Amino acid sequence: MDMSRGQDAALRARALKVIPNGMYGHESVRMLPDSFPQFFSKAEGAYIWDADGNRYLDYMCAYGPSLFGYRDARVDAAAQAQAALGDTLTGPSPLMVELAETLVDMVDHADWAMFCKNGTDATTMAMSSARAQTGKRIVLVAKGAYHGAAPWCTPIPAGTVAEDRAHVRTYAYNDVASLEAAVSDAGDDLAAIFASPFRHDAFIDQEAPEPAYASRARELCDKTGAMLVVDEVRAGFRLARGSSWSELGVQPDLSAWGKCFANGHPISALLGSDSCREGAGSIYATGSFWLSAVPMAAAIETLRIVRESDYLEHMVRLGGRLRSGLDAAAKKHGFTLRQTGPVQMPQIMFADDPDFRVGYGWAEEMLERGIYVHPWHNMFLCAAMTDADIDLTLNAADDAFAALAARRGDLAPHPILVALAAATAG
Amino acid sequence: MDMSRGQDAALRARALKVIPNGMYGHESVRMLPDSFPQFFSKAEGAYIWDADGNRYLDYMCAYGPSLFGYRDARVDAAAQAQAALGDTLTGPSPLMVELAETLVDMVDHADWAMFCKNGTDATTMAMSSARAQTGKRIVLVAKGAYHGAAPWCTPIPAGTVAEDRAHVRTYAYNDVASLEAAVSDAGDDLAAIFASPFRHDAFIDQEAPEPAYASRARELCDKTGAMLVVDEVRAGFRLARGSSWSELGVQPDLSAWGKCFANGHPISALLGSDSCREGAGSIYATGSFWLSAVPMAAAIETLRIVRESDYLEHMVRLGGRLRSGLDAAAKKHGFTLRQTGPVQMPQIMFADDPDFRVGYGWAEEMLERGIYVHPWHNMFLCAAMTDADIDLTLNAADDAFAALAARRGDLAPHPILVALAAATAG
């Protein structure tokens, strides 16, 4: 496929003048292969079109928000019906109560809900609520886990001060001894333990939560009075129709939600148990658009489809086909994949590829064939994907692996990753 | 008017079960007169309808976002056209570049833009960018000013730790000596001075910025290398068609925007000069929905109307009529108003009303007559208001003042304010 990139290049040149570095945040392509487009003009179902009109089957799903596919007709009809009444008003709409009741019904541990806009809003409110509830300060997070971009949790310290993390400490995910030691070190000042539903850190193999780790986290919170917080922002409703740790028999006190529960409409939420109601009720949390009605209408419809459709089983089945098919295709061409994480949220990297040169090369080859995959961040399936899309992907992968094998000797690591590695080693 | 409140009461009872305290944030009616409805079902132009179907002329405009009136047909058509293409995608749309260029054109000091969702996102990014740019830590804010709800700036400390404000210090707005002393105390560690375009703190008379204060803030930043930040979130585009301090001849390095620049669609922005481009480019700032295309389409159309219509002059003219008419009506019934702030963002309180009992009573009487006013927060006019709306307001006010005069001896302070005053005095 010969893809035009003229519009994207022109937009990047303009962006460089009016946006620092031309782009920022997780949707910047600065750390992706050079051929990846920065700008997208439209989307439908499982597909996105870049500014030059090239179409891709999108395995990022907007980094999560697209759960049923872009512009889902059911969700968008609910949003439009509410937009014809009102969105951001002087007070919330009755839909806010209905949405809170819906989430409380669906998420086992939840007795109440608070709505916000960013995942970071929800995780920060979780931290503040836990501190207010317990009167304690120390918050434990797994080393390398992403819980947002606020000063207390941002992965890049530029512009923060040491005090922002004064009481934020780390433990190793899935490592009971490490967690116990961190809890012990916190003495009588432990406010919360944060955990992701599974280990979905960038650049590494993903890990399912060990049942012993999850249940020990709960026990340690019960023993110390600290709040257990599960950060569902990235994985929520892609692993289960409610709390991701319910299948482990572990109920948190607080859970943070975002990304996909309104299928791409902007809303996030903090859910909590009665164990933290008073703390949550005492903090000041607000935002200009937090109580807007349109995303709540979209969320109510999204959650109805979550309850009533087989969206999850469908994604899991397709994800299973994708994983086994990719393994076979890779093997055929002499590559070994490291495929980790739930099949509906796959992380795909290559064995013996410490500087990601093979992964970047494969992502380039897939993109060239109309499939958008990511070389180091977990991906997302959506329910709009079909068996035909998996066939398309596997056919493209067969060609991509062949092309990659042919240029294997010429692959070089991406300059940004080289610079990062040097900085880290420094 | 006999207003039914049954639906609102039923919703509040349900909300109390599934939302801490039944509501939170700036749209909670906990600190408003008891008759104020909590839930709203629809809106159009300058009017809102509560859950019981009662209609009000709305002088809060969603606490700012409604600039041209609710559901402005021009803005919403632009939003819908983009929604038919895509909203939250795997990358930004070309509209992001166009919107950044538009704001850079319209706001004198701005050389670049970054988009986010909450006003708090923008002010926090301003702080982080200033710290990154200068390599210094101390941030000065005016005592009592609201810059958002994050741990470093929330007006209510519950759930925060002392370290959150380790390097945040205060000065008195409009007080040059106080500002100079704070800058001097900061020594060589000053990162930023924050200022609101005018003093719009709750519960007090508003103050226009003294030219000497604004220009001294600029000089002190020039002298120390600190960044001057104007927080335009609440007032932006209601005072001017660009930077609010341009009329004073003072250009900040950074400005935070939110609320109304997409007429109620969810988007906020940090704008900056080249003096802070490197700092802003070095911080990690991101959110799931920050680059969504629909609010950007709405913003581009909103800003076109800002440039091409007389929306501002219209609001100022109506605001002037409102102010003088209310003064006359109050006087006729033996009341003296304290009307402060720009006429299009009026603060209306009563002389000799230290515990707000008269203000609360008047707000109740106005609400009963279909006019939604606030007893202690600045209000907002929108461009959808008409002379007929001002006539309606002044007629209602005449009746309201008469009714208030009749029950003057029976007025009592609101229990929440009594409790707050006691806590503060304690």
Image: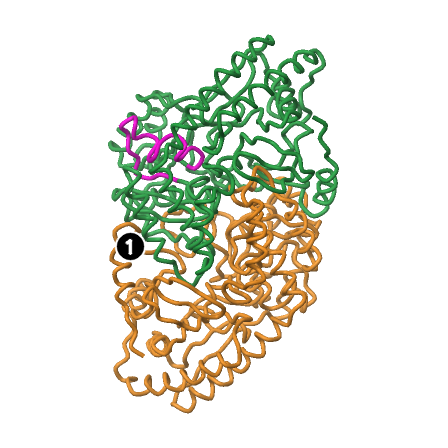
Chain colours: A orange, B green
In front: A225, or B299?
B299
Left or right: where does residue A238 sit relative to residue A21?
right
B404 left or right of B278 in image: right
Residue at the spot x=32%, y=26% of the render?
B214
Q: Is residue A344 above or below residue A219?
A: below
The answer to whether residue A145 is seen in the rendering is yes
Residue that carries the numbered disc 1 in the rendered image? A15
Q: What residue do we see at 44% from left, 47% from top?
A: B267
Task: Give amino acid for label 1.
Answer: Ala
Residue B91 forms part of the magenta stretch: no
Q: Position of residue B239 (x, y in %)?
A: 38, 30
Main SS of the magenta part reads loop
Among the 4 quarters of the image, the one containing residue A397: bottom left
Residue A210 location, x and y as percent?
Answer: 61, 71
Task: Tell me the magenta residue range.
Answer: B233-256
Q: Residue at x 35, y 71 (%)?
A: A54
Image location of residue A376, percent across then percent down:
41, 70
- Considering depth in this image, is B388 or A365 the residue closer to the camera? B388
Question: Which quadrant of the rendered structure holds the N terminus of chain A?
Answer: bottom left
- The answer to whether one can see residue A184 in this image is no
Q: Secondary structure at mark 1?
A: helix
Instruction: Identify whether B387 is placed above or below A381.
Output: above
